[in-house]
Image (cartoon, rainbow, N blue to C red):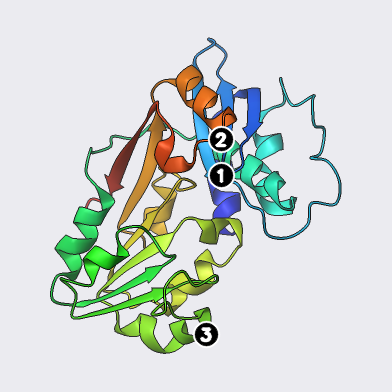
Amino acid sequence: MNIIERLISETQDRKIISAHIGFFTTAVVSSDGNGTARCGLATTVKDGICGGPVQRAGSLSGTPVRELAALALSGKGPEVSLGMAAINSALPTLKYEMINAEELIAEHGRGKNIAVIGHFPFTDRLKTLAKELWVFELAPKDKDDLPPERMAKLLPRADAVAITALTLLNLTFEPILELCNKNAFKILLGPSAPLSAVLFDCGIDAVGGTVVDNIPLLLRHLGEGANFRGLTGKKMVVIRKVRK
């Protein structure tokens, strides 16, 4: 099984309450048999063409989570985001820490080589503490951003690697992980990041993700056009692999 299939297999038996595709972020709310609601998020994928409306648009309520989650594998455009958000709404709850993912990257990369896949807001701050900083970005946001073609040469030299969870959505996560030095500290982060121990089995050391603690408030902001950073009703958390 690939990583998405493994994540789907970890989801709990829940049903969809509602699905919300915002311009920046997608949210899926699901419920267990006792009516306990949880909200999962994912970055809204706009690249690629969704050939028509989202499958079963308007009738997703009541759908088993795993049925919607399958779109993370077979969907196109925003359907992939729906699938990932569905997964994130139904993973077993793990113990998390209220630590900024940037702090972990700095801790493991200070004075060393740091690679970042995806141009995050904190990349400029990492330049001041890294020996070398390589930022890889499909759509360059800075003159120093590097194309993905440079990964094969530079990733094996990185001591700390921050990987955007968008790589799960575009199915590049596993090829990128294979390029990383096995001894490097590797963190997966972003709105789509699943808080799942499955990622530890793949070689990830930490995951920086999101817990939604006020679903109505978050959905209101999402529906009114807030970007991910502007979404109220969430908190940023980290889960870490326990080193033996």
Placement of 178 over or under 149, stated as above or below: above
Decide if residue 67 is on the left or right side of residue 210.
right
Which residue is denoted by mark 1 in the rendering? 24
Mark 2 and mark 3 in contact (Cβ < 8 Å)? no
For the point 55% across and 50% down, the residue is: 6
Which residue is denoted by mark 2 in the rendering? 225
As measured in the structure, the alpha-carbon distance from the residue carrying label 3 to the one carrying label 2 is 34 Å
Residue 123 image offset from top left, x and y in percent: 31, 65
The amino acid sitting under disc 2 is: Gly
Q: Which quarter of the rendered picture does the N terminus lie within?
A: bottom right
As measured in the structure, the alpha-carbon distance from the residue carrying label 2 to the one carrying label 1 is 8 Å
Placement of 4 over or under 213, stated as above or below: below
The answer to whether any part of residue 1 appears in the image is no
Q: In which quarter of the image is residue 117?
A: bottom left
| Within-10-Å neighbours for mark 1: few <14, some 14–19, many 20+ | some
Mark linked to residue 52: none
Task: Work out which residue is located at the far right of the displayed protein and give it.
Answer: 52
Residue 166 image offset from top left, x and y in percent: 52, 57
Mark 1 and mark 2 in contact (Cβ < 8 Å)? yes
Of the two numbered discs 2 and 1 in the rendering, the one whose residue sits closer to the viewer: 2
In this figure, what is the number of numbered marks?
3
For the point 57% across and 13% down, the residue is: 33
Which residue is denoted by mark 3 in the rendering? 149
As measured in the structure, the alpha-carbon distance from the residue carrying label 3 to the one carrying label 1 is 27 Å
